[in-house]
Image (spheres, grey):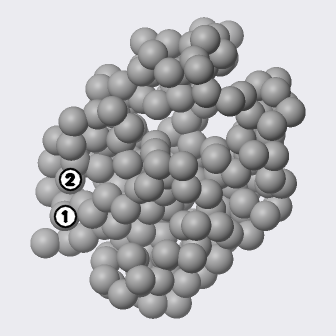
Amino acid sequence: MTTMICIGDSLTEGTDIPVGHTWPALTANALNLEVINCGIGGDTTNGMLSRFYPEVVDRRPAFAFIMGGTNDLWWGREANTILGNLFSMVVQARHHGIAPVIGLPVPVNIPAAEAGDFSPPWGGYARFTASLEKLIEALTRHAAESEVAVVDLHHPFLGKNQQVRADLFLPDGLHPNKPGQLTIAREIAIVFRQDLNFS
């Protein structure tokens, strides 16, 4: 069976979601893939890059799904550093015959997040949101230039007037709920079938 390894942070790990209902599990069912979830809550792209070889390359999957950057931005790191880390993983994957796929991170439901009891992002939510939008734009542009498949998981979580859809998030405002997980799996399946000709 074809294998895909997903490397990322809590958005990939599936915070507070039963194992069988996380988007990697749902994607496995939708595409008849073996999907290995290597998401670690709180991880940054530095951490992802440091474990990319042993957790992804050594296993030689057909696909590597790479999504990260939210935690980096939360701590005020620059987009160029994030891009460098993500595309270092892309280069490694391709060098070893693994097809990289980049996921664009979901937005944050700020009203819910502000009501939480965790520390806000460095520089505040407005700065974080602006930085995330710039990262999404840069990722999309660089992926197109590098001919890397991209799954847009950001805009499907936006509704009218580009407002975040609260119905797709857990109460913390940061992590997708079960309908949000289904949304992610659906978008990935569309790209695999239409852009990667996977059946």
Q: Earlier in the sequence, mark 1 or mark 2?
A: 2
Query: Amino acid type of disc 1?
Result: Glu
Which residue is depicted at the point 75% across and 46% down? 75
Decide if residue 92 is in sight here. yes
Image spot of residue 134 (x, y percent): 80, 42
Q: Secondary structure at mark 1?
A: strand
Q: Quadrant of residue 124?
A: top right
Q: Residue under circle 2?
A: 28
20 and 155: which is toward the camera: 20
Above or below, 98 relative to 6: below
Q: Secondary structure at mark 2?
A: helix
Query: Amino acid type of disc 2?
Result: Ala
Q: Residue under circle 1?
A: 34
- Labelled pair 1, 2 in contact (Cβ < 8 Å): yes
How far, Cα to Cα, is label 1 from label 2? 6 Å
Residue neighbourhood size for the residue with mark 1, other residues' Cα within 10 Å, grouped as few (<14), some (14–19), many (≥20): some
Residue neighbourhood size for the residue with mark 2, other residues' Cα within 10 Å, grouped as few (<14), some (14–19), many (≥20): some
Which residue is depicted at the point 64% across and 77% down? 88
Above or below, 101 relative to 105: below
The C terminus lies in quadrant: bottom left
Which residue is depicted at the point 58% across and 73% down? 49
51 and 82: which is toward the camera: 51
Which residue is depicted at the point 24% across and 70% down? 3
The N terminus lies in quadrant: bottom left
